[in-house]
């Protein structure tokens, strides 16, 4: 069923049971602020959305900017023949390799040294029970089956019981050292090996052979006249357009409604003489239709009824 908001002055609502107290808290968090301060008993109001208002005005804009066009003349290029050194003069070297003789020698490849080996400690696992929390008495929330409680605040009507909680123990596993760690000393003797090496018998030499330079020709293009550019300006264009500026923003207003068309359980709307004609509505399956009896009442009303079943 569609929910509607109803403001009634001088009407008291009775809400019984713990679940009803939670429903009131949810509705009050949505309830609009600053309701009508001049309302009288028996009047009903709806919060109505008022559309924003815009004002047209004319503005001149540039439809086409001024710009420049360019006429380009290509450059003039001539071809010429140039001579260059294809390969510079140099020197070629002929290397005569040195002469070696192989000899054998006994050399030390590893000296004698002392090595220390660590023997780790030996551990044993021990399990113990440790008290982590002493026994205590605490207050706990209780319930009375079948009792009907009227709650006025979160703590009204609650039952609290003083109960005793047993102590809490935890199993702890510890590693105990059975045999401490130690260090063993190990002696390693020196090590020798037979090697062969080459001994220089005759030194190497280098012979220099001169190499003459080589020449060749290539074709190049030379710029005789650079390219030129001539520019001309094209004037821009403008036109007038219609724009809209915001005169009044969207807002919400409280509008009076006909209380006789709103159904409330156990409530008969009193007959009150009104200074202005209220807004009426009809409940359909597709939504709410608001019929305005005054041209000032425009927009769509958003409403909700507190305590509607």
Image (cartoon, helix red, strand yellow):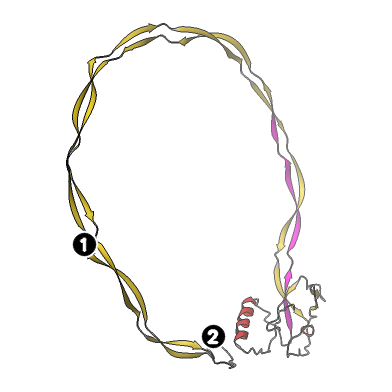
- Where does residue 209 sit, x and y in percent of width and height? 36, 7
Q: Check residue 66 for magenta coloring.
A: yes
Whether 196 is drawn above or below 217: the answer is below
- Mark 2 residue element: loop
Of the pair 200 and 149, the residue shown nearer to us = 200
Height in image: 88 above or below 46?
above
User: Label 2 to label 1, Cα distance in Å?
Assistant: 63 Å
Callout 2: 10 Å neighbours few (<14), some, many (20+)? few
Left or right: 127 as drawn, with respect to 304: left
Q: What is the span of residues highlighted in magenta in the rendered image?
A: 40-69
Residue designated by label 1: 180
Residue 59 location (% of width, % of height): 74, 50
Of all residues shown, which one is farthest toward the bottom? Answer: 147
Q: Nearer the viewer, residue 126 or 236?
A: 126
* Vertical position of residue 295 compared to residue 240: above or below: below
- In the image, which disc is placed on residue 97? none
Residue at x-position 64% and y-position 79%:
27
Q: Quadrant of residue 198?
A: top left
At which x and y percent is residue 250? 70, 66
Identified at 39% across, 85% down, the residue is 166
Q: Position of residue 26 (x, y in %)?
A: 62, 79
Work out which quarter of the rendered image holds the N terminus and state it: bottom right
Q: Is residue 200 magenta?
A: no
- Mark in front: 2 vs 1: 1
Question: Which residue lies at the image location 23% right of the left edge and 28% below the top edge?
Answer: 195
Which secondary structure, mark 1? loop
Q: Quadrant location of residue 35?
A: bottom right
Could you say which disc has been placed on residue 154 in the image? 2
Most common SS among magenta residues: strand
């Amino acid at each position: 069923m569609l929910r509607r908001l109803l403001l009634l002055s001088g009407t008291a609502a009775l809400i019984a049971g713990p679940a009803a107290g939670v429903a009131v808290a949810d509705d009050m968090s949505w309830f609009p602020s600053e309701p009508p301060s001049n309302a009288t008993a028996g009047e009903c109001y709806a919060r109505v959305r008022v559309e924003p208002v815009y004002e047209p005005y004319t503005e001149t804009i540039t439809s086409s900017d001024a710009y420049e066009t360019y006429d380009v003349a290509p450059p003039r290029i001539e071809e010429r023949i140039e001579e260059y050194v294809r390969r510079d003069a140099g020197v070629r070297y002929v290397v005569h390799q040195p002469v070696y003789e192989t000899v054998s020698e006994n050399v030390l490849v590893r000296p004698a040294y002392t090595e220390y080996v660590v023997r780790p400690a030996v551990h044993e696992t021990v399990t113990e029970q440790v008290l982590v929390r002493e026994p205590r008495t605490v207050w706990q929330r209780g319930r009375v089956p079948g009792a009907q409680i009227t709650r006025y605040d979160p703590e009204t009507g609650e039952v609290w019981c003083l109960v005793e909680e047993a102590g809490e123990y935890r199993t702890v596993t510890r590693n105990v050292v059975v045999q401490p760690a130690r260090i063993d000393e190990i002696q390693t003797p020196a090590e020798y090996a037979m090697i062969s090496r080459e001994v220089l018998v005759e030194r190497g030499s280098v012979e220099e052979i001169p190499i003459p330079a080589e020449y060749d020709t290539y074709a190049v293009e030379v710029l005789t006249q650079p390219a030129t550019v001539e520019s001309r300006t094209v004037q821009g264009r403008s036109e007038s357009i219609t724009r809209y500026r915001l005169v009044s923003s969207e807002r919400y207003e409280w509008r009076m409604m006909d209380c006789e068309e709103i159904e409330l359980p156990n409530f008969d709307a009193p007959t009150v003489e009104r200074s202005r004609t209220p807004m009426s509505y009809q409940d359909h399956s597709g939504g709410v239709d608001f019929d305005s009896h005054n041209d000032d009442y425009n927009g769509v009303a958003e409403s909700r009824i507190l305590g509607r079943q």
